[in-house]
Amino acid sequence: MKTLSIEIKDLSKVYNGQSVLRGCNLTFDRGLIHALIGPNGSGKTTLLRLCNLLDVPSNGEVLLKNLDSGLNSGSLKNSIELRRRMAMVFHRPSLFNTTVWKNILYGLKVRGINRKESERKGKKALEMVGLWKLKDRNALTLSVGESQRVALARAMVIDPEVLFLDEPTSNLDPGSVVIIEEIIKDMKKSGTTIILVTQNIFQAKRLADKVIFLLDGMVVEYGNTFDFFNNPKGERTMRFINGEMVY
Amino acid sequence: METIFSGFLKAIGLLISFDKELYGIILLSLIISGGAVIIATFLGLPLGIITGLKKFFGRDFLATLLNTFMGLPPVVVGLTVYLILSRSGPLGFMDLIYTPYAMVIAQVILATPIIAALSHSTVVAIDPIIRDTARTLGATSSQIAWTIIQESRYSLVTSVIAGFGRITAEVGAVLIVGGNIAGYTRVMTTTIALETSKGEFGVAIALGIILILISFLINSMLHAIRKKGIR
């Protein structure tokens, strides 16, 4: 049963004196796909990193299952336990310099999952992304599309309650995009909450249940995908959807 | 020209006849440098990795210090070790001066900063996304550290080989603390120095060939390891 929910309250982040995220308030509904859209520098990746406990907020808090994430209050143990219920796939596929198979099993190994169970899950995940035949290849010799599929399978194998995806299909060929989007849909079916950063509003339309529009580090609009694209509340949202510059 | 030619012929003769004394010197050199590099690895590798992974007060100063010590002049190291181990020195009672142990100590002092500084640079250069990836996959701090070490394994081996390369070719320190005693502390580099001063070029050239071969072997290994480790 996947019960982890994420709520952010008055979340802000300052990098080198520059405010990247400003007073964001959001609740991510369990089991839904949320698309974070917005122009470059709007704070999407920063928000993702804060929610995934990779960075510490300058102000505000990330509440996981109505429990403080622990980084602000300083409980590392709590933070590791919470982090192990989440996973993230980065914009740039970051695979370890070892075989595809060892990459896939990494998350299970650090959790101390037994070998038989790990191999069963690993095989299933690799088959899902269509790369079982490449399991013995060095992961760094794969194409970008294959690498991103391995990265996704590596996150999928640990069956996270929340999956963060930072532009997972940018620069990929259409074939790889289709495979990755199908996996994202499958993960949603298994109850995983998905938070997807994307520059592609068509992808947001195809996949997301909810859309969050960020601009200048602030949440400008948040709503159901249909309402967001058909009845946007804000003038800037409408301009962004229509492909106009909103800086 | 004739001297070089005759010296070269004599060298070939010594090498192919498996001259006992010559090969004894080669073996002793490898044992001393091998022992030193093993000790230096146990000291330098953890030092480099820890200073690369952990953030603590004085970390940058320590890294600068290690880099500075990479270029320690061997004769200064030899002199320092000599002063410490000589009869009148603080550790003179241990009777280590003019023994292979003193040579190992000097070589450890030379190799440790090289291994530490190179492994420090290696660990620091690992892409931060690797650390983030391990973290997002649920790794603890120690598991993240181990992952970073594994990611830098090829370069870490390179740093050890570089340390070995430096000390096998070194002459000043081992000459001062070893005393170049035949059959006991006479190694390749000190023999070359001695034989050259005597005008006996055959042995010197033979050992020079072996040193170049060792250097070639080390560089071939470095190249192969680097090639394997290239992303």
Image (tube, rainbow, N blue to C red):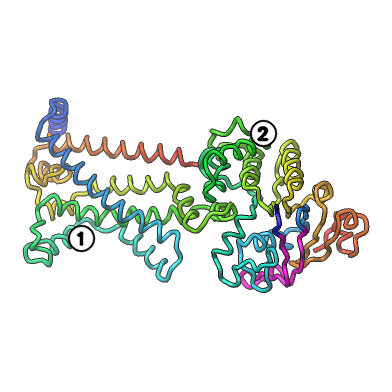
* Three-letter amino acid code at the position of disc 1: Val
Q: What residue is drawn where x is 7% and y is 47%? A: B181
| Vertical side of A26 occupied by A228: above or below | above
State the mark number for residue B76. Answer: 1
Any magenta on residue A237?
no
Measure the alpha-carbon separation of dots 1 and 2: 61 Å
Looking at the rendering, the stretch of residues picked out in magenta corresponds to A5-29
Q: Are marks 1 and 2 in contact (CB under 8 Å)?
A: no
- Mark in the foreground, 1 or 2: 2
Q: Chain of mark 1?
A: B
Estimate how packed mark 1 is, as few (under 14), some (14 to 19) or many (20 or more) residues with alpha carbons within 10 Å: few
Residue under label 2: A130
Along the line of sight, which residue is nearer the eye, B11 or B60?
B60
- In this rendering, is residue A230 above or below B59? above
Position of A89 compared to B124: left or right? Answer: right
Residue B11: percent from left, percent from top? 15, 31
The amino acid type, in three-letter code, at marker 2 is Gly
Closest to the observer, A64 or B38: A64
Residue B110 located left or right of residue A168: left
Q: Nearer the viewer, residue A54 or A44?
A: A54
Residue A189: x and y in percent read 76, 46
Please tell me which residue lies in front, B23 or A197: A197
B121 shown above or below A10 = above
Element class at badge 1: helix
Q: Quadrant of the C terminus of chain A?
A: bottom right
Disc 2 crowd rating (10 Å Cα; few below 14, some 14-19, many 20+) is some
Would residue B156 appear left or right of B168 to someone viewing this image? right
Question: For residue A38, which quarter of the picture?
Answer: bottom right
Residue A15 in the magenta stretch? The answer is yes
Q: Residue at x 31, y 51 (%)?
A: B41
Chain letter of mark 2 equals A
Residue B44 rendering spot, x and y as whole percentages: 32, 55
